[in-house]
Image (tube, helix red, strand yellow):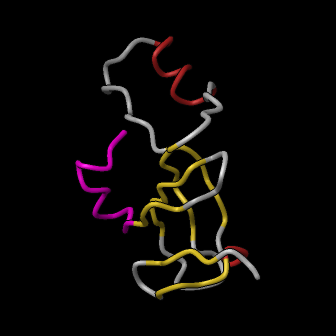
Amino acid sequence: MASLITCPHCSARPADEFTIKGAVLKRPEADANAEAWMDYVYFRKNPHGRHREYWHHTSGCRRWIIVERDTVTHEIFGTFDAALGAPAEVIL
């Protein structure tokens, strides 16, 4: 059985309809130094455990969502409309 991801707009859909686009990171301030921007744009951690990522529903509604999942077990804890952001209680 294929993994299902609950799109906030389309309900539960097969995972292959989505594309993972990257970690949800706090963007540096506009006047941040070059090192802060370099870290934000190019360097990523490879977390083990609970993590939030941007996913794009490429073969569905084409909306962006935030998926909170465990990178080891692939258990999904929640999905949120990226335009609204994730509730504060799930920010890691």
From the viewer's perspective, is 73 left or right of 30? right
Residue at the (65%, 52%) spot, across then down = 73
From the viewer's perspective, is 9 left or right of 48? left
Q: Quadrant of residue 17?
A: bottom right
Image vertical order of residue 78 relative to residue 63, above or below: above
Image vertical order of residue 56 relative to residue 87, above or below: below
Residue at the limit of the structure toward the left, as seen here: 88
Query: x and y percent of residue 92 in the render?
Result: 37, 39
Disc count in the image? 0
Q: Quadrant of residue 30?
A: top left
Residue at the (64%, 71%) spot, across then down = 18
Image vertical order of residue 24 relative to residue 64, above or below: above
Residue at the limit of the structure toward the right, as seen here: 1
From the viewer's perspective, is 88 left or right of 16? left
Residue at the (62%, 35%) spot, across then down = 48
Q: Is residue 73 magenta?
A: no
From the viewer's perspective, is 65 left or right of 14? left
- The residue lying toward the viewer, choosing from 22 and 78, is 78
Which part of the image, by quadrant, shows the N terminus?
A: bottom right
Residue at the (40%, 78%) spot, across then down = 8
Query: x and y percent of residue 20 in the render?
Result: 64, 58
Q: Quadrant of residue 16?
A: bottom right
Secondary structure, magenta segment, majority class = loop
Image vertical order of residue 92 relative to residue 12, above or below: above
Query: x and y percent of residue 85 in the render?
Result: 31, 57
- The residue lying toward the viewer, choosing from 59 and 74, is 74
The segment highlighted magenta reads 80-92
- The residue lying toward the viewer, choosing from 61 and 66, is 66
